[in-house]
């Protein structure tokens, strides 16, 4: 897989997903790729972090210090964000949104650890978007009932039904593509810089890492969660417009 | 009609360049959003954090069309579906 770039070292440009090993299951060939490995590492880090957090909060003190400070800051921030958007629906969805936020954020910045970010694989982001999509429509049917959903699809006139349907199904696709393309572009640009500039890429790419991994990753995490919350909030509103 | 692979690769590179023209739109849109957000903060400095988060959300949504162009460019350059 070789790009059309003029330099000789262009053949070594590498930000693709690689196969680690493959096995057969029920006649299907399944491939374990770098995405799976990086995903497992991210999950192990998160599990370790939260086990440590649980131990810390068991002997929580009135006046927080050290690690407890960090945890309270994190929970405060997530609670504030979710309450600000969802209002009275916040307690129901706090678990999902907070989990989503922490997972996507750690995945995005895992490029700093030398991993290939798992969110730079369309399979991961599409799965996340499909979970959000299911949640949105489950709540739409739960709160607006079938009648409300059908009249929502038929608004403003019945013959707008196909356009409204396309609009509904575009939600998970645009949600997942936005996150995927942002992280992939960061990964691709860093790979290009490191391979094409060779020894010139010394120290100063750190600034680019701050932008592409930290800033862009944080913004995209925030946007994914905000959009999910806005759509769920929309679906939960029972007032018929 | 048969073309040789080098010709198709060259045309793919031109196509990738053309696809990235899509970057103009989001650039202009994000600039307008940032400008209006700056003037909003000037009028009401107290609401700075809310204005910033609204601006970032709008900008990220506006960015989507540019990212679609970028995806086409990356696919043309590195996956090369036409040259196979």
Image (cartoon, coloured by chain):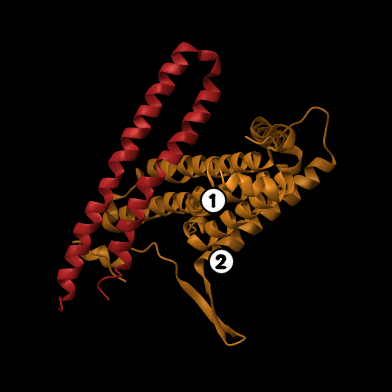
Chain colours: A orange, B red
Image quadrant occupied by the N terminus of chain B: bottom left
Is A23 situated left or right of A64 in this image? left
**Residue shown at the point (43%, 35%) measured from the top left:** B59
Tell me the SS state at disc 2. Answer: helix
> Along the line of sight, which residue is nearer the eye, B69 or A9?
B69
Please indicate, yes or no, whether residue A185 appears anywhere in the rendered image.
Answer: yes
Question: Can you give x and y, in whole percent of width and height, for residue A179 in the image?
Answer: 48, 50
Question: Can you give x and y, in whole percent of width and height, for residue A4 in the image?
Answer: 23, 64
Q: Earlier in the sequence, mark 2 or mark 1?
A: 2
Please indicate, yes or no, whether residue A189 appears anywhere in the rendered image.
Answer: no
Question: Can you give x and y, in whole percent of width and height, for residue A115 in the image?
Answer: 50, 58
Q: Are marks 2 and 1 on the same chain?
A: yes
**Residue shown at the point (30%, 44%) measured from the top left:** B23
Residue ranking furthest to the bottom: A27
The chain under label 1 reads A
The chain under label 2 reads A
Instruction: In the rendered view, tell whether residue A83 sits above or below residue A231.
Output: above
Nearest to viewer (mark 2 / mark 1):
1
Image quadrant occupied by the C terminus of chain B: bottom left
Q: Which residue is mark 1?
A: A168
Instruction: In the rendered view, tell whether residue A184 sits above or below residue B62.
Output: below
């Amino acid at each position: 897989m070789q790009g059309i770039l003029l330099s000789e070292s262009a053949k070594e440009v590498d930000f693709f997903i690689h196969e680690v090993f493959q096995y057969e299951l029920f006649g299907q060939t399944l491939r374990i790729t770098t995405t799976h490995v990086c995903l497992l590492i991210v999950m192990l880090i998160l599990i370790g972090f939260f086990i440590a957090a649980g131990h810390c909060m068991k002997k929580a003190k009135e006046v927080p210090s050290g690690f407890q400070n960090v945890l309270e800051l994190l929970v405060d921030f997530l609670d504030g964000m979710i309450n600000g958007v969802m209002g009275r629906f916040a307690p129901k969805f706090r678990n999902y949104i907070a989990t989503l936020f922490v997972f996507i954020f750690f995945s995005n910045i895992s490029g700093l650890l030398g991993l290939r970010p798992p969110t730079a694989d369309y399979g991961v982001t599409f799965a996340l978007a499909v979970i959000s999509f299911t949640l949105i429509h489950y709540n739409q049917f739960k709160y607006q009932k079938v009648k409300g959903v059908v009249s929502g699809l038929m608004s403003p006139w019945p013959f707008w039904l196909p356009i409204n349907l396309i609009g509904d199904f575009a939600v998970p696709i645009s949600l997942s593509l936005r996150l995927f393309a942002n992280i992939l572009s960061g990964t691709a640009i860093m790979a290009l810089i490191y391979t094409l500039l060779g020894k010139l890429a010394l120290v100063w790419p750190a600034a680019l890492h701050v932008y592409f991994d930290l800033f862009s990753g944080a913004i995209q995490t925030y946007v994914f969660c905000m959009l999910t919350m806005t759509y769920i909030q929309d679906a939960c509103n029972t007032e018929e417009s | 009609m048969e073309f040789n692979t080098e010709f198709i690769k060259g045309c793919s590179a031109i196509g990738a360049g053309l696809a990235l023209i899509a970057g103009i739109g989001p650039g202009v849109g994000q600039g307008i959003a940032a400008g209006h957000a700056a003037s909003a903060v000037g009028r009401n400095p107290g609401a700075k954090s809310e204005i910033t988060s609204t601006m970032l959300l709008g900008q990220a949504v506006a960015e989507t069309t540019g990212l679609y162009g970028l995806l086409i460019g990356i696919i043309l350059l590195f996956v090369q579906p036409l040259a196979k």
